[in-house]
Image (tube, grey):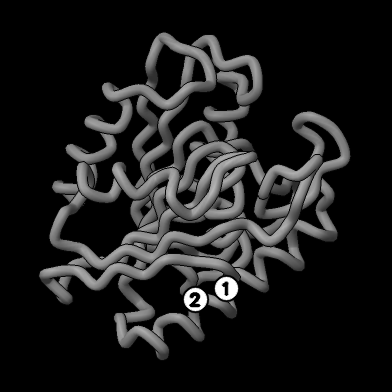
Amino acid sequence: MKHIFQKGKDLSKPTLLLLHGTGGNELDLLPLAGKIDEAASVLSVRGNVLENGMPRFFRRLAEGVFDEEDLVFRTKELYEFLDEASQKYEFDRTNIVAVGYSNGANIAASLLFHYQDALKGAILHHPMVPRRGIDLPDLSGRSVFIGAGTNDPICTPKESEDLHSILKSANANVHLHWENRGHQLTFEEVNAAAEWYRQI
């Protein structure tokens, strides 16, 4: 997978896994990493799927309708890439915190839904529920921040609340943060995520 790795100043800190939104790339979220933890290593990944020339992490059938077969395949692909990258760049595989926006948040949530040991934690900006009706692994000890918009036309408040309750049911420690905005990522939301991160 096309990516950027930046070695951090403090290798005891989590490695931040940056996952962009639809049409973005591995450069998009780099400014966020500095706001969250400027001493941490950063692994920023580009999605392997193209939709009308725009990078994504998995295919969808329509707006808000995921191609579940492709989602499962791409989630496994990303999981295995993290295994390889941790060996190549010599960072702690058990100490990764994902930072995802929109489509990137969805693939990060899918990692949590499918693999107990994929992530130590996740900052999910405007995610949807990646899959419904499946049993999640035990996510005890995993911390998740969900950033949501009360007026988000793509990711409705109910979607955010459903994801919150599903992750809590799997024993994750989940914080749901609301902004009175739409689907865009705001400074206020980024700052709230950074504040949450400092407390986990």
Residue 105 visible at all? no
- Judge from the rendering whether residue 175 lies leftward or rightward of residue 62; answer left or right: left
- Judge from the rendering whether residue 124 lies leftward or rightward of residue 31; answer left or right: right
Determine which residue is flagged by label 1: 79
Q: Which residue is drawn at 49% across and 37% down?
A: 164
Q: Label 1 amino acid?
A: Tyr
* 191, 31: nearer the viewer: 31
Element carrying mark 2 = helix
What x and y, as percent, mark residue 29? 40, 45
* 27, 84: nearer the viewer: 27
| Residue 95 falls in image quadrant | bottom left
Q: Is residue 88 above or below residue 10?
A: below
Q: Label 2 amino acid?
A: Leu
What x and y, as percent, mark residue 176? 39, 31
Determine which residue is flagged by label 2: 82
Q: Is residue 180 above or below residue 200?
A: above
Q: In this view, does 53 lie above or below 65?
A: below
Cβ atoms under marks 1 and 2 closer than 8 Å: yes
| Residue 10 falls in image quadrant | bottom left
What x and y, as percent, mark residue 17? 40, 60
Residue 104 visible at all? yes
